[in-house]
Image (cartoon, grey):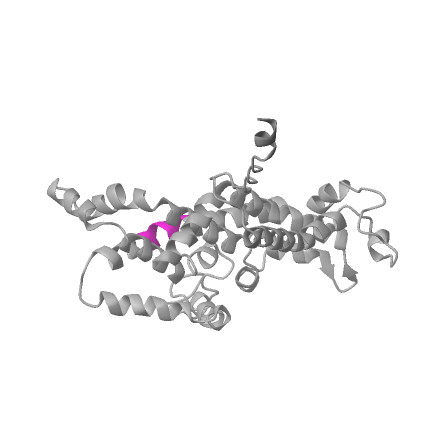
Amino acid sequence: MATAELQKPAPAPVPRTTSKGRPVSAGRIALYVTLSVVSLLMMVPFAWMILTSLKTPVEIASQDAGLLPEHWQFGNYADALKAAPFATYARNSFVIAFSHTVLNVLIASMAGYALARIRFRGSETIFYLFIAALMIPTYTKVLPEFLIVRFMPLAGGNDILGQGGSGWLDSWWALIIPGAVTPFAVFLFRQFYLDLPVELEEAARLDGLGEFSIYARIMSPQVKPAFITVALLTFESSWNNFLWPLLVTHTDSMRVIQVGLSVFKTENGTQWHFLMAGTTLATLPMVVLFLIGQRYFVQGFATAGLK
């Protein structure tokens, strides 16, 4: 008996598995390691920004300065907020970003639904025009949009021909109306609505619902990832916009936070400790929003990519 027990084969090693029970292969481990290294590399600029915001000007200018501050200057944040009316800048940025988000989500979702679910003459042509609009570089649209805003009839002292005044310049209209709806948002919504089963709207029509009720009550709740994705992208793009607000505003009461950061860069030099502190504060809302909606954000792009 003892000899038979000694000759029993050793049990096979249990392969390592993931939380879902799948075996972990060498390729998957290499992928995780690669992604971890890339993630750390992408975090380096943010870490440098935060650490620089906590240094003194002398330490930043020193050639022997290390990565970590010798004296942690948390007061840089309070001083940066006092150096410029950042409360006004942040308010303006939030109002513009919130307005763009609401308008883009509402209008683009309705346009995407119409292109996906309502068949009418010219719908394919209109969709292809939206695709073509995606290929237009942003900076090529700046001058035409500026001229439209500047010569807007009956606005800002302009006459019916758009002459004699400043149009929409330095106003909420110039900051909100251009760019309120993006072709990418319409395209994304169309792709999501296009994938929904036709039985949903047929059942809704049999129950007597109109087209708008079908859009709002039946179809839209099924594409929640698209709404979250468009909302996050729109808010982030509007919050970080610099060139357009710089062109159409000239007073502190209408400037946004990205333009306000330029006050720390003058002819005499750049106040790096204040600039990094202000940039950190401007970046924080975007990080929080992404952490809150990252699951829907990733799901939205992954689902759209499968269509």
Q: Residue at x 54, y 59 (%)?
A: 245
Is 154 in the magenta? no
Q: Residue furthest top?
A: 1
Above or below 20: residue 102? below
Q: Where in the figure is residue 212, as x and y percent of width and height?
A: 22, 47
Determine the image quadrant of residue 10.
Answer: top right
Q: Is residue 197 left or right of residue 79?
A: left
Looking at the rendered image, the quarter that the N terminus falls into is top right
Above or below 228: residue 143? below
Q: Residue at x 31, y 69 (%)?
A: 128
Looking at the rendered image, the quarter that the C terminus falls into is bottom left
Q: Where in the figure is residue 64, as x and y percent of width and height?
A: 88, 56
Q: Where in the figure is residue 201, as x and y percent of width and height?
A: 19, 47
Extent of the magenta region: 102-109
Q: Nearer the viewer, residue 172 or 228?
A: 228
Q: Nearer the viewer, residue 217 or 166?
A: 217
